[in-house]
Image (tube, grey):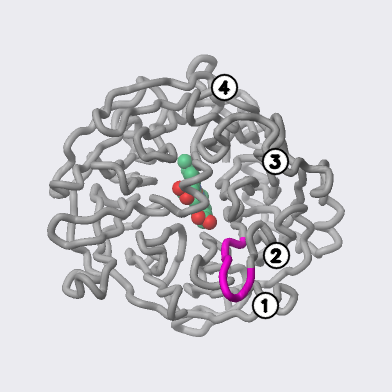
Amino acid sequence: MPDWGKQGVLTQAQAETMAKFLQQEPPAPPEMSLEQMKETWKVTIAPEMRPTEPQHSRDWEDFFAVTLRDSGEVAIIDGDTYEVVNTVKTGYAVHISRMSATGRYVYVIGRDGRASIIDLWLEKPEVVAEVKTCYDARSIEGSKYKGPEGDFSDKYAIVGCYWPPHFVILDGQTLEPFKIVSTRSYTYDTEEYHPEPRVAAIVASHYKPEWIVNVKETGQVWLVDYTDPIAPSIKMLEAERFLHDGGWDASRRYFLVAANQANKVAVVDAKEGKMAALVETDKIPHPGRGANWIDPEFGPVWSTAHLGDASLVAIGTDPEGHPDSAWKVVRNVPVLGGGSLFVKSHPNSPWIWVDHGLNPDEKVQRSVCVIAKADPTKTEKCWEVADYGRAVHFEYNREGTEVWVSVWGRADQPGKTGEIVVYDDKTLAEVARIPNLVTPTGKFNVYNTVHDVY
Ligand code: HEM
C-alpha cells in the first residue's frame, strides 16, 4: 500500500477514517467470470494490422522493459544507447514483464491484474492489447516450446492471480482470455482445504509444451500442459509452502523456487516432470530468478539471497557431473544485511550481484555487493549506488558486459523519483545514468528473458 499520509494523498482525519474502515469485517471480494474479463479486453492493433518486420533500425533484442512502479507504466529502453524509446501505460504497480518466445512481444502484469502486450516491432513500441483477468496478480508468461510436439512460439499467454485464486490462459497475440482454472484445493501435506491459494511464479518450460505454475498456500507445483489449452492436463507435484519466486538452473532442466515459509528451495525436474529435491536454506530465500555460475570447487550452482538473513547461498545443480554437491548448499556467503530481494549473474560475467532493497538501514538499502565467481567465499566489493532511494534488481545487457541497477526513489520527491545506473561489468565502473524515471524496479532484457539467461 502506498504511504498515503506521507505522500499527502490523505489528511490525518482521512487516514483515521481509512484505519477505522479497515477494521470492519471485510466482505468477500468478488469473483471474476470470463464474460467480465472479456468486457475489459481491448485490442488496439489487431495482429493482421501489425508490421511483418521491425519498423525501426534499433537492436530490439537488446531492449529493456523497465517497470515504473508508481506511475503504472513500463519504459522501453534501448540497451545500446540508453534512450527511452517509449513509455507506455500499463496496469498499476507493474510486477513483472516477460517476453514472448520470439521476443517480439512483452507481456506485462500489473498488481491490479491488468495484463498488457507491447509490440516491440512498431516504430514506437506500444500496447497493442490489454485485459484484466483478476483484481490482484503477480505473474505472467508466454508459451515457449518449439519442438516435435509443435511450435507454440507466441501462441498462448498465462496470467497467475492472487485474487480470485486462479490462472487464466489467453491468446498470445491478442490476450483474449479463454480458459480459467481455479487453484482452490488442498494443502500438499495435511490435505486441508484452502479457499484462496495464490499463484506465485510461472515459468514456461523449454523441454515440453508446459507451464510450471507455483501455487503458494497449498505448496503445490502444477505442471500445466498447454497442448490443448481448453482441456489442459495438469500434474500436481507436492513441494513446500509458501512457494514464491524462482528460476531455472543453467541447463534449464531444473526449476528452483523459494518456499519462503519453510526456508527451503524446492527443485522441480522439468524433463522428468517430478520433484528433484527440497533444499534447506537460510531465512526467507528470495531469489528473483536466481543466479547461475560455475563454482571453482563445486561445479554448476544456482544461488539465492534472503529477506531474513544476511547471506547468499549457492546450491549445486549438476547431479550427473557433480553428484556430491547436487541439491546441497555448497556456499554460504555473508552479505551486508538481510532484506535482499534479488541476485543476478550472466555466463560472461566474473561476478554475482546482490541487492538489499528491503533492509531497514537506509545506507544498506541503497547498497549492492558483488561476489567473485573465482572466489565465492566473501563479497569482493559493496557500495552505495545513489545517495537516496533503494538499489533494487539487476539485469544484464544481451552480451553480458553491462549491468543495470534500479534506484527506486519516491514518486512524490522531484529529482529523487529514481534512475537506472549502468555499470561496466568487468571493471565495475559506472558508465551511465538513465535519469528521471519514476520508481523503476524490475528490468527485463529481451534476449536474456527469452532465453532465461541469469
Ligand atoms: C507483498 C509483496 C510482494 C509480493 C507478494 C510479490 C510477489 C512476487 C512474485 C510471486 C513474483 C514472481 C513472479 C514470476 O516470476 O512469475 C515476484 C517477482 C518480482 N517482484 Fe515481487 N512481490 C512483492 C514485493 C515486491 C517488491 C517490494 C518489489 C520491488 C522491487 C518487487 C519486485 C519484483 C520483481 C522485479 C520481480 C521479478 C524478478 C525477476 O524475475 O527478475 N516485488 N514478486
- Please rate how many residues cluster around mark 2, counting C-alpha atoms within 10 Å: few if below 14, some from 14 to 19, many from 20: many
The answer to if 149 sits in the magenta stretch is: yes
Q: Is residue 94 above or below residue 281?
A: above
Q: Quadrant of residue 211?
A: bottom right
Q: Dots 3 and 4: beta carbons under 8 Å?
A: no
Q: Nearer the viewer, mark 4 or mark 1?
A: 1
Counting every numbered tag in the picture gives: 4
Distance from label 2 to label 4 (Cα)?
37 Å
Classify mark 4: helix, strand or loop: loop
Q: Outermost residue toward the bottom?
A: 191
Residue hosting label 2: 169
Q: Dots 2 and 3: beta carbons under 8 Å?
A: no
Distance from label 3 to label 1 (Cα)?
33 Å
The answer to if 409 sits in the magenta stretch is: no
Amino acid type for the residue under numbered disc 3: Glu
| Sequence-first disc among 2 and 3 | 3
Residue hosting label 4: 412
Percent position of residue 62, x then y: 51, 37
Classify mark 2: helix, strand or loop: strand
Residue hosting label 3: 53
Q: Dots 1 and 2: beta carbons under 8 Å?
A: yes
Q: Which residues are magenta?
A: 143-150
* Residue displayed at 58% across by 66% down: 146
